Structures are given as structure tokens and as C-alpha cells.
Image (spheres, rainbow, N blue to C red):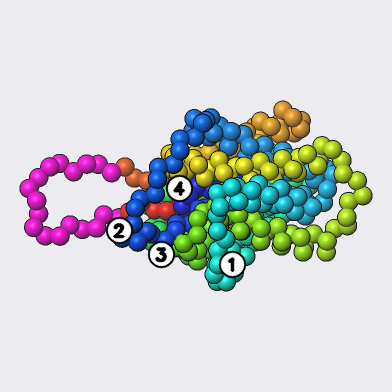
């Protein structure tokens, strides 16, 4: 699951980093040819992306029934990387050449792929996939809180601060704070929340280090996934033993998780951002916990108490507030002012 093109949107559990802006074209160069219109309407692709990322938490749960968490993460990264490498080869994308860029991509791979993917896999050993999907929806809340501290151009508004408070009230509702968190697996829930925190931390890092590299979004994302796969290839043998069998359903779940949720989904979102813009594309975030909850209850038989869906709705409402921009009204026509106009404050970027 991924965020749209700029670091404004939330990323679901399989999210690569938001696309990084490339260097501007030199003056006088011819504009790029218009992209060919996709065969499928953007609404169909939007729905497909929502389903793919919503079902990712169910696939993680099934995968951990046959494999160790690190093995699930390595398998999904390997399958996802294969899809993106194939897409890069078809489009003849060039890999980044700067050693500095590769160094920053290594850190981004850890923060946006290897670490959160592994945390979610470990979390779902002890918590239901529905709870993992809802924890993932807290990423915009973490992002808003972090961006105020880490991004000097972000300024908190009353609406965004209110959204932060509402969102964390929703988290407490999901966790049943008034019951003393009884019946809740605190380590598993903590790992899921920490995984959701990794995404905005990674986005802020990417925003500060990888903007203007001159490489395309696809090349950067594919390179990052390659590095994350290498990281797991080193870590997995140190903490797990080689599987003695390959059970069918968990194996298919891991392959689908990688090929669809970490590979195809990136390409779908890449096209959506180009066609309808990041603001519309990032709305997929709000469908993910709904689909994850429905899938967990219907297909895995997970129990659902009243506070889980109610709290999830409150979380999403808070997240929406933190991502909102104040409406701008059109000023009435009047005589021009000889003094230079003040620079209007731009909208706050979501992290």
C-alpha cells in the first residue's frame, strides 16, 4: 500500500515511499508527450487498489500461519520487487547513479518497507487482522504530529490539531481504554502502531533527502524495494530456519501479498496520481480499514466488538481532518493595488 505522489497521503502496510519530484526540465526543451489513456477507468482502478490494500492484512495473517514473520516479509518484498523490476525493464527506466542517492534509498527501504512490513507480520501473530488494519489508519495522525516538528513549512491549524485529538480518541476507543485495555495484546498492538509510525517518519526522510534527484518515481521505488529485499535476505536467515515445507495457502498468500499489494498496487497508484492527482488518489487510505475489517470478519471469523468499528470511524474522521485544507474564497474584483501582494500561505503538506 502506498501514498500518492507527494508526501501528503497515508500509506497502508505495503506502501513504498511517496513519489519524489524529479528535476525540472531545462528551459526550451520540448514538453513530454501526453500519456496514453489507460484502458480501465480510474474509478475501477481506484476500487481495485482499495481492495488489494484492504486485503493485505488478511494475507499477512494467512501467511504467518505457515511461515515466520521475517519469511513473510522477505517473500512479499521479493515478489513485489519482481513486478516493479519487470515494469522498469518494459519502460526502460534507468537506475539512480549517485552513491548518495543509493545511501538515502537504503534508509528509506528500512523505514518504509523492511521495518513496517516485519512489524505488521509479527503483530499479526497475536492480534487480529482487523485491528492491524485499523492501526495502519493512524499513519496520518502520526504524520501530522511529526510534520509540525520536522517540517518547518508545516504549520498546525485549529482543524488539524482538532483532527489529531479526535483521531487519538478513536485509537483509545478501538483499544478499549476505559476497560484498562483488558483482553488486548499490548505487544502486538504496539508493534502495529509502531509500524504505522514508520511510514510518516520515512516520508519525512524521503522528502528531506531524495527530492530533485532527477530519477523517476518508478526507478526510485523499484530501487528502494530491491534494497529492502536485500536487507531481509540478510536478516531472515539470522532469525529463522529454512522452511521444511511450503503449505499451499500461506505460500499463495505471501506471493499475492507481494505481487499485488507491493508490486501491482504501486503501479496502479502511480497511474492514479498522474491521472487524477494525489488528493483524489490518497482517498484510498480511508477505504483500507473498512475492507480489512470486513475481510477479517467474513473470511477469518475474527470477532468484532462494538468499539472496534466505532473507534475506526472516529480514527478516520480525525485523519480526514488532519489532511484537510481550509477553503479559499475568491476575493471580489477591485482596483489593482500598487503595492506588491502578500504571499498567500500554501496548503500544508501531509506527511
In percent of width and height, residue 271 lies at 50, 42
How much space separates mark 4 and mark 3, taking CA atoms? 17 Å
The residue to which callout 1 is attached is 102
Q: Nearer the viewer, mark 3 or mark 2?
A: 2
Q: Secondary structure at mark 4?
A: helix
How much space separates mark 4 and mark 1, taking CA atoms? 32 Å
**Mark carried by residue 322:** 4
The residue to which callout 3 is attached is 152
Which secondary structure type mostly characterizes the magenta part of the structure? loop
Residue displayed at 79% across by 52% down: 71
In percent of width and height, residue 307 lies at 63, 36
Give the left or right position of residue 234, taking residue 81 as reference.
Answer: right
Residue displayed at 76% across by 40% down: 253
> For mark 2, does the 10 Å Cα neighbourhood hold few (<14), some (14 to 19), or many (20 or more) residues?
few
Q: Nearer the viewer, mark 4 or mark 1?
A: 1
Q: Secondary structure at mark 1?
A: helix
In percent of width and height, residue 297 lies at 71, 31
Q: Can residue 55 be seen at all in this image of the molecule?
A: yes
The answer to the question of whether label 1 and label 3 lie on touching residues, with beta carbons closer than 8 A, is no
Q: Earlier in the sequence, mark 4 or mark 3?
A: 3
Q: Which region shows up in magenta?
A: 328-345
Q: Secondary structure at mark 3?
A: loop
- Name the residue furthest bottom: 99
Question: Does the magenta run of residues contain 183?
Answer: no
Tell me: residue 253, above or below residue 27. Answer: above
In the rendered image, which quarter is residue 62 located in?
top right
Residue displayed at 26% across by 54% down: 344
Residue displayed at 88% across by 55% down: 242
The residue to which callout 2 is attached is 28
Amino acid at each position: 500500500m502506498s501514498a500518492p505522489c507527494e508526501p501528503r497521503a497515508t500509506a497502508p502496510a505495503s506502501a513504498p515511499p511517496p513519489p519524489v519530484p524529479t528535476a525540472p526540465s531545462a528551459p526550451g526543451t520540448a514538453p513530454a508527450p501526453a500519456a496514453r489513456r489507460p484502458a480501465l477507468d480510474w474509478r475501477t482502478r481506484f476500487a481495485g487498489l482499495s481492495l488489494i490494500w484492504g486485503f493485505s492484512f488478511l494475507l499477512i495473517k494467512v501467511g504467518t500461519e505457515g511461515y515466520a514473520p521475517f519469511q513473510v516479509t522477505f517473500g512479499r518484498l521479493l515478489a513485489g520487487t519482481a513486478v516493479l523490476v519487470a515494469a522498469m525493464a518494459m519502460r526502460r527506466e534507468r537506475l539512480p547513479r549517485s552513491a548518495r542517492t543509493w545511501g538515502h534509498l537504503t534508509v528509506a527501504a528500512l523505514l518504509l518497507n523492511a521495518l513496517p512490513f516485519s512489524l505488521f507480520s509479527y503483530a499479526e501473530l497475536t492480534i487480529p487482522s482487523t485491528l492491524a488494519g485499523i492501526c495502519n489508519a493512524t499513519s496520518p495522525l502520526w504524520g501530522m504530529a511529526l510534520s509540525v516538528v520536522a517540517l518547518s513549512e508545516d504549520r498546525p491549524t485549529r482543524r488539524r490539531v482538532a483532527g489529531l485529538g479526535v483521531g487519538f480518541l478513536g485509537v483509545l476507543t478501538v483499544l478499549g481504554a476505559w476497560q484498562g485495555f483488558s483482553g488486548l495484546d499490548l505487544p502486538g498492538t504496539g508493534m502495529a502502531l509502531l509500524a504505522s509510525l514508520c511510514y510518516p517518519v520515512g516520508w519525512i526522510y524521503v522528502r528531506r533527502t531524495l527530492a530533485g534527484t532527477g530519477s523517476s518515481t518508478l526507478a526510485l521505488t523499484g530501487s528502494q524495494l530491491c534494497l529492502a529485499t536485500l536487507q531481509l535476505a540478510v536478516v531472515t536467515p539470522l532469525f529463522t530456519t529454512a522452511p521444511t515445507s511450503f503449505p499451499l495457502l500461506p505460500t499463495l498468500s505471501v506471493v499475492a501479498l507481494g505481487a499485488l499489494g507491493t508490486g501491482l498496487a504501486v503501479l496502479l497508484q502511480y497511474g492514479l496520481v498522474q491521472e487524477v492527482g494525489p488528493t483524489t488518489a490518497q482517498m484510498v487510505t480511508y477505504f483500507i480499514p473498512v475492507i480489512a475489517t470486513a475481510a477479517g470478519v467474513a473470511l477469518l471469523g475474527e470477532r468484532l466488538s462494538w468499539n472496534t468499528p466505532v473507534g475506526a470511524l472516529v480514527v478516520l474522521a480525525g485523519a480526514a481532518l488532519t489532511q484537510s485544507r481550509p477553503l479559499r474564497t475568491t476575493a471580489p474584483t477591485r482596483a489593482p493595488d500598487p503595492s506588491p501582494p502578500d504571499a498567500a500561505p500554501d496548503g500544508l503538506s501531509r506527511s
